[in-house]
Amino acid sequence: MVLRGVNRVLVGAAGVVLVGLGAAVLVGALDLQRRWGVTLPSAWPFDGPRDVLLSRAARTKWRDEGWWWPAVIAGLGVVVLLALWWLLAQVRRRRLRELVVDCGDGEEAVLRGRALEEAVCAEAEAQEGVERALVALLGRRTAPEARVGLTLAPHASPAVALSQLDGEALEHARVSAGVGRLPVEVRVRAVRHRAERVG
């Protein structure tokens, strides 16, 4: 959940920066401020079609300062480390191999993740209207999350299928894993079928 929030913030921030930069380039390149008679702020990066983002004076302004290159290298290093952290966080979302179940007497048991996935999958596919189910367990050993994909028959009701999935298969999974809550992401799609000829 945290990673999903970070992804949304990063994508949103990148979108805002790109839209703002694109608008600035468009206004400058098309000379819209003179055509429309609009006064732009003094800090606007582009003043006309022949203007550049960074002038030669701006590019070389800090080059002779002693702190400039260490600051540039440190800034780029931080950006690279953050990018690597984000990339590793994406890759690390593997399926759970095993879950730790509290037996209630101070002892812990280990439940194979694949076994629980297969049990939930079999129970989901036994529901009326469910043609196929795919289940993947993610998260931590003590705090699992589930990702479920359901393929429904043309006559099936998605609301009924989701209600049955939550009340039966997922509830049994929560009890088996010994967890109070099991965050689940469900993706539903209908099975494709050929159109019937009438008449």
Image (tube, grey):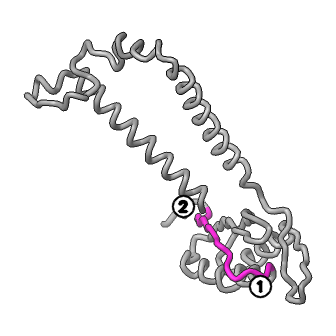
Name the image quarter holding residue 62: top left
> 108 or 173: which is nearer to us?
108
Query: Is the residue under label 2 in contact with that under label 1 (CB below 8 Å)?
Result: no
- Looking at the rendered structure, the number of numbered marks drawn on it comes to 2
Q: Position of residue 167 (x, y in %)?
A: 66, 86
Q: Position of residue 58 (x, y in %)?
A: 36, 16
Q: Which residue is mark 2?
A: 195
Query: Which label was assigned to residue 175?
Result: 1
> 177 or 71: which is nearer to us?
71
Looking at the image, residue 162 sits to the left or right of residue 182; the answer is: left
Image: 111 above or below 163: above
Looking at the image, residue 69 sits to the left or right of residue 174; the answer is: left
Q: Residues within 10 Å of mark 1 (few under 14, many from 20)?
A: few
Q: Position of residue 97 (x, y in %)?
A: 85, 62
Q: Which residues are magenta?
A: 177-191
Residue drawn at (70%, 85%) of the image: 168
Q: Is residue 40 magenta?
A: no
Residue drawn at (55%, 51%) of the image: 7
Name which of mark 1 and mark 2 comes first in the sequence.
1
User: Cα distance, mark 1 to mark 2?
Assistant: 42 Å
Name the image quarter holding residue 80: top right
Q: Nearer the viewer, mark 1 or mark 2?
A: 1
